[in-house]
Image (spheres, rainbow, N blue to C red):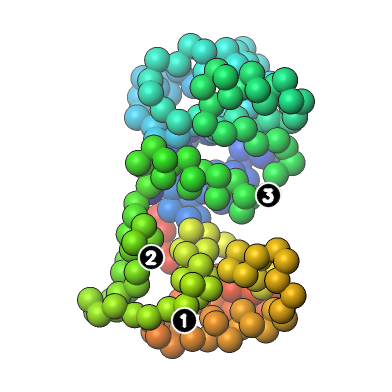
Amino acid sequence: MAHILIAEDEKPINTLIRKNLMLVGHTCVSVFDGEAVFDEFEKHRFDLILLDIMMPKLDGFSVITKLQEDIPVIFITARGAVQDRVHGLKLGADDYIVKPFDMLELGARIDSVLRRAGKVAQRFSLGDVTVDLSGRQVFRDGVPQEFTPQEFLLIEALIQNRNIALSRDKLLDIAWGFDYGGDTRTVDVHIHNIRKKLGWEAVIKTVYKLGYRLEVEVQL
């Protein structure tokens, strides 16, 4: 997973982002003003910066302009005007997210940027199961397992959002699309098949009245 610098001066938002990213296995450092970004770069190497624009001491636009390191940057800001988006992207940001945002969307955007930068793991292992995310293959004890496209998308979503509860509606949207007219019980059937094929009965937890969570031990 990635080592991420969170530059966000609103402490509740900074804390929320850090906790959610650490749940899925990333390591994070938080700073609360623009100048502190460069202080941390003297101590650590990062794979990604989440960068607010309106920060004390040095704003996000100035920070990205002064950056010497070749590192992906995602702006996270309340400034949603088109000219701000265009300006941020022209300065070299890899993505631009406007507050308020959904944490699952933020996670997906982070995964996408890290993947493009070649900084994300392409394999996930849990017990005797290995999932090749780039090759879209699943192995148990080295033996390939057959899954439908929807089942693989569910596995992928659970892995990318591990330790985070995903609603049945969200999983339905991920695996079947927003225009799918089926019942959320379809998700239950497919999760049952995934649990059985992979022996994941104990790690895919049912979240009461919500959905499912892949429970994986991480170091916080």
Disc 3 from disc 1: Cα separation? 26 Å
Give the amino acid at mark 1: Ile
Disc 2 is placed on an element classified as: loop
Residue at 55%, 82% (x, y): give it: 190
Task: Indicate which label's residue lies in the foreground, 2 or 3.
Answer: 2
Residue assigned mark 2: 136
Disc 1 is placed on an element classified as: helix
Give the amino acid at mark 3: Asp
Instruction: Give the percent coordinates (x, y) of residue 4.
Output: 45, 37
Disc 2 from disc 3: Cα separation? 26 Å
In this rendering, would 55 be left or right of 50?
right
Nearer to the camera, 166 or 55: 166
Nearer to the camera, 196 or 220: 196
Give the amino acid at mark 2: Arg
Residue at 35%, 41% (x, y): give it: 118
Q: Which mark is residue 102?
A: 3
Residue assigned mark 1: 194
Q: Is residue 135 above or below residue 38?
A: below
Task: Indicate which label's residue lies in the foreground, 3 or 1.
Answer: 1
Compare marks 1 and 2 and give the one earlier in the sequence.
2
Q: Is residue 128 above or below residue 50?
A: below
Residue at 52%, 86% (x, y): give it: 192
